[in-house]
Image (tube, grey):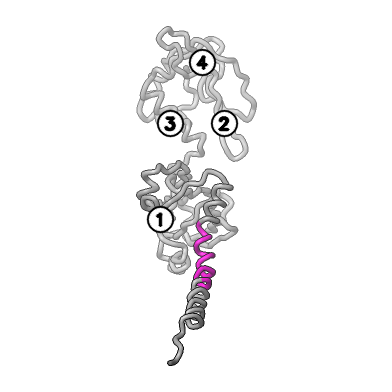
Amino acid sequence: LEIVRPDHPVFSYLDQLDALSLFSTAGIRRYFKMEPSVESSVLARFSDSERNPAVIVRSFGQGQTLMIATAVDLADASRQKNWSDLAQLRWIFAAWADQTTRFLAGGQKSPLNRTVGSPMFIEVPAEASREKALLRMPGLRQNQIEIPFRSDRLVISSARNEADSQNQMDNTRQEDISIGTAGNYRLLFPSNAISDYGFSLQLNDNETNMSRLTFGELDELFGENRWQLSRSFEELERSVLLGRIGIEAYPLLMTLLIIFFLSEHLVANLFYRTEGT
């Protein structure tokens, strides 16, 4: 391989480690011939007589696309029947794949997805200092926030409830904005030169765990012989009706007992009264 753009983010990290020479010595046995368009940029070429493009990048919408003209898998590597030896470069290939993934993901150094309760660190450009940005939140809500002065990052914490959010935003010296709702967020800057920043907060995996409880776990949760399992709607309806019979019949039974008790007294007074002598 011949690296044409060692300064590109895909190869710059290997260039800093002086590992591009080792990367370019990987054996290539088969590849596709590609004709790059005008909008494409060739990052590497094959070092044969035709010097065909090996790695091509191109912007697509708001993202990036990358095409490699050869395969990088380890299938049949021991018999050297695979297309290339790139995947056999061990840590060099791992570092290159990591930088390629970061480039295709937009080059974000901080993750775009967090669990509710974890802080979100947003890198703020220097030109955004002392500007007010707009944070759009789930539920068609939005809040205006002020970027900390001479700070290269903004901390958005979801550890506190949303009731504290307004109190913190009233204090311009506070860097934390409290959010706690799962969903998609977007930070908008007034300057068109600064791109928007989007991230998401998601619920903990345990809160969406739909695995069934065992009988032992049900006994521990409700108590032994204090729960009943219904496997259909008819069984559930029958169990509910049987459970409600005692509650609904209690007033009627008490009324019948009182009537029977009073009737017994009346009958006793009628048949068992003593006659005067």
How far apart marks 2 and 1 lie (CA) works out to 32 Å
Judging by the rendered image, the residue that carries numbered circle 1 is: 151
Task: Tell me the kind of residue under disc 3.
Answer: Asp
Q: Residue at x 44, y 92 (%)?
A: 276
How far apart marks 4 and 1 lie (CA) works out to 45 Å
* Tag 3 secondary structure: helix
**Given the current orientation, which residue lies at the most extreme right position?**
38
Judging by the rendered image, the residue that carries numbered circle 4 is: 46
Q: Residue at x 53, y 62 (%)?
A: 144
Judging by the rendered image, the residue that carries numbered circle 3 is: 98
Task: Tell me the kind of residue under disc 2.
Answer: Thr
Report crowding for label 1: few under 14, some 14 to 19, many 20 or more residues within 10 A (C-alpha). some
Quick check: marks 1 and 3 in contact, CB under 8 Å? no
Q: Position of residue 68 (x, y in %)?
A: 53, 22
Q: Main secondary structure of the magenta part?
A: helix
Quick check: marks 2 and 4 in contact, CB under 8 Å? no
Mark positioned earlier in the residue sequence (2 or 1) = 2
Residue 2 lies, with reference to residue 202, above or below; the image says above
Judging by the rendered image, the residue that carries numbered circle 2 is: 65
Q: Which residues are magenta?
A: 243-256
Mark positioned earlier in the residue sequence (4 or 1) = 4
How far apart marks 3 and 4 lie (CA) works out to 22 Å
Mark positioned earlier in the residue sequence (1 or 3) = 3
Q: Position of residue 98 (x, y in %)?
A: 43, 31
Q: Is residue 245 magenta?
A: yes
Mark positioned earlier in the residue sequence (3 or 2) = 2
Camera-nearest label, 3 or 4: 3
How far apart marks 3 and 2 lie (CA) works out to 15 Å
